[in-house]
Amino acid sequence: MLSNVLTRIDQHIKTLGKYTSTPGKGTTRLTYSNEDLQARNYLKDVMRDYGLTVSEDGVGNIFGKLAGEVNGPSVLIGSHFDSVPHGGDYDGPAGVVAGLEVAKLFQENGIKPKYPLEVVALVEEEGSRFGGGLMGSRSITGKLTDQTFRELADSQGVSTVEAMKSIGLNPDLVKKRDRDTMKAYLELHIEQGPILENEKTSIGIVEGIVGLSQLEITIKGKAGHAGTTPMDGRADALVMAAHMIAKLPKIAETYGEGTVVTVGKLSVYPNGANVIPGSVTFTIDLRSTEEAKLKTLLEETQTFIRQLQSEKISISIAEQLYMSPTILDDEMKKQLEKGCEKYKISYQSIFSGAGHDAMVFAEQTKAAMIFIPSKDGLSHCPEEWSDHQDIEKAVYVLFEAAKHLTEVN
């Protein structure tokens, strides 16, 4: 392995980590923010330096293309570059950096692929600004329509179109890609769990990805004075929300291991210390490794919530995202195993409990993922860290797979 790959990985991770709105308190890089613009400009500069042709689509996904000998479908490789609030430097960017370094190895070795190689840097995988998540990949594959995209807005009421234009992006560009232009999709990601570190294994070859659904619940009661409104005359939206949220874990537990529920975002209005909450909005994230369980859990959760509506309290439910459990491509997994064996890198099979862009691409093209260890299993926090030597190992494994995929018919 070449030491300059590791040096470049260090540089990329360090530089991208600077583009945060919360310095010293983790990485906060929301989609279409100034930090997004700084990161995308850096990534585009690196792509050009690596001999790639750069373009962006109508949601701001970035593509760096190495042309092939034939004008055929591309092998895509990459990940996302947005973050959760106060997250880490590795969730997403490690995969984009790995894709860049695979392209650099093609350049350094003078490899002209038969089919094109495209490094992709995807937007809004986390859903931290516009909700739902996986927005970049869902747009590419047509699961998120142009109309629906244009109707999305953040918590401040800023639309996707307004936000894109604020950093010079063009929402009128084409968003959906013809599936015939995609030959395969490869992604590296940090594990976000403790398994690989505990097993002292460098690479996890992902067998499949958990199914997930995300709901947004809005409860409307009636605001009032905290001191002058009798208890029996209240329509407290927060009390109702608390009742719902307390019940949800018990519902999920009945479905057994592999099924989980999380309330991760809650907004209270008008949010005053001496005001009865008149409106509450919160999200519910439901996940299961089995689609039958996920669908039943989703139905039971919605039924439970709707039954709580009354004359005083109104409730609305919006499903922001639904993705079935995904089994990744067997042939591509074998190619990744061959790469590990060639470089004598330890590996094992692993199942992903987190959603990833690979699960979206897998509906339209062959897709595969590899994980690298996360220190102490931590992610979505400032302490998130992965060894850059593990990223380097993953780059060579992906390089071997990319060489094969860009050559075979």
Image (cartoon, rainbow, N blue to C red):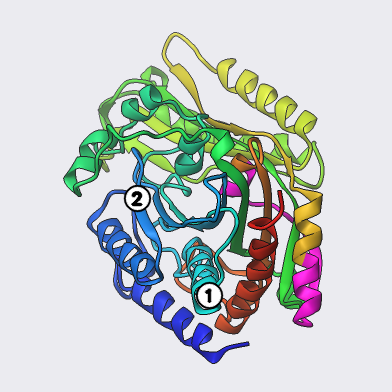
Q: Residue furthest bottom?
A: 3
Q: CA distance from mark 1 to mark 2?
A: 23 Å
- Residue shown at the point (44%, 26%) measured from the top left: 145
For marks 1 and 2, the one nearer the N-term is 2
In the image, residue 109 sits, relative to residue 163, either above or below, namely: below
**143 lies left or right of 164:** right
Which sits in the foreground, 322 or 39? 39
Which range of residues does the magenta coloring cover? 337-359
Can residue 157 be seen by looking at this rendering?
A: no
Q: Residue at x 63, y 69 (%)?
A: 399
Q: Which amino acid type is marked by label 1?
A: Gly
Q: As displayed, is residue 85 above or below residue 17?
A: above
- Residue 343 among those drawn in magenta: yes
Callout 1 secondary element? loop
The tag on residue 55 is 2
Outermost residue, top direction? 311
Check disc 1: other Cα within 10 Å, few if <14, some if 14-19, many if 20+. Answer: few
Looking at the rendered structure, the kind of residue marked 2 is Ser
**Label 2 SS:** strand
Residue 110 is tagged as: 1
Q: Is residue 385 left or right of residue 254?
A: left
In the picture, which quadrant includes the N terminus? bottom right
Q: Residue 253 location in percent, x, y?
A: 76, 41
Q: Is residue 123 visible?
A: yes
